[in-house]
Amino acid sequence: MPATGKSSTSEAMGERILVVEDEATIAEAVSYALRESGYDVDAVANGRAALEAARAERYDLMILDLMLPIVSGLDVCRELRAESDLPIVMLTARDAESDRVLGLDLGADDYVTKPFSVAELVSRVRALLRRRELNRARGLVRRVGALDLDVGRYTASLAGKPLQLTRREFRLLALLASEPGRVFTREELLQEVWSDARSGDRRAIDVHVSNLRRKLEEDPRHPRRLQTVRGAGYRLVAG
């Protein structure tokens, strides 16, 4: 079983975090900081143990190192995202941009590069959990023409037919649907959907928009719903 540390604050908060990190000094530092911030923390040191723990227990968030023994962090992310909407914050090496992009595409919610500030990581965790709770509390159903999105349940449909969206595609579409007709810049989309507007990731917005158009538009080459505003960004309209 994972080693657990608890405090009276964490019990009151009731939010549980699974730290998956094979470097003991990093795992201990992160776990300590999270416990001091009031979270209930378990820690495991390999990908197989991470999958077993995530399937056996209820967690509110996972901090996942990508370079893990037995089962890689990318494989852990891929398997969990196919069966769960558990928020995932990846830990990556500073020079592993391709892994970061792949991890985000697989459904991770945010990433922090090593070496990192533990205080920054805790802040990212807090922001991600707060955003998730706000979405749940709102229980929002957003409608734009024939498009319906249930923000609380992460489901979407077009003209009554369910849409198969990745987690990140859904978050991007939900943001655009929050203010139909408004032009969102790439920086705004990155800040909201990825939590950190890094210029190196701007092209990822274009890729996700292209994927969404294949699912939303009758003719993706001439989109009516998800429109590009040249030099400004994107907007969602009824179509």
Image: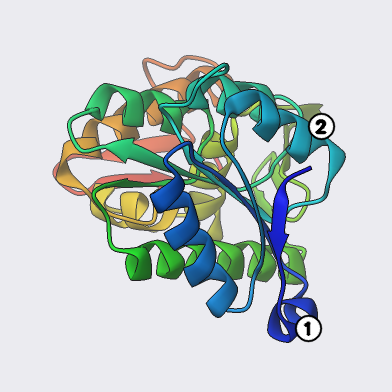
User: Mark 2 or 1, which is nearer the eye?
Assistant: 1
Q: Nearer the viewer, residue 129 or 157?
A: 129
From where the camera sits, is residue 150 visible?
Answer: no
Residue located 70% across and 52% down the image:
3
Q: Nearer the viewer, residue 210 or 197?
A: 197
Res 6 quadrant in image: bottom right
Q: Which mark is residue 160?
A: 2
Q: Which type of secondary structure does the marked residue at label 1 adopt?
A: helix
Measured as percent of width and height from the top left, residue 102 is found at 39, 23
Residue 192 appears left or right of 146? left
Residue located 74% across and 64% down the image:
136
Measured as percent of width and height from the top left, residue 42 is found at 67, 53
Residue 40 appears left or right of 64? right
Give the residue at mark 1.
12
Residue located 27% across and 55% down the image:
116
Which corner quadrant holds the N terminus? top right
Q: Nearer the viewer, residue 6 or 118?
A: 6
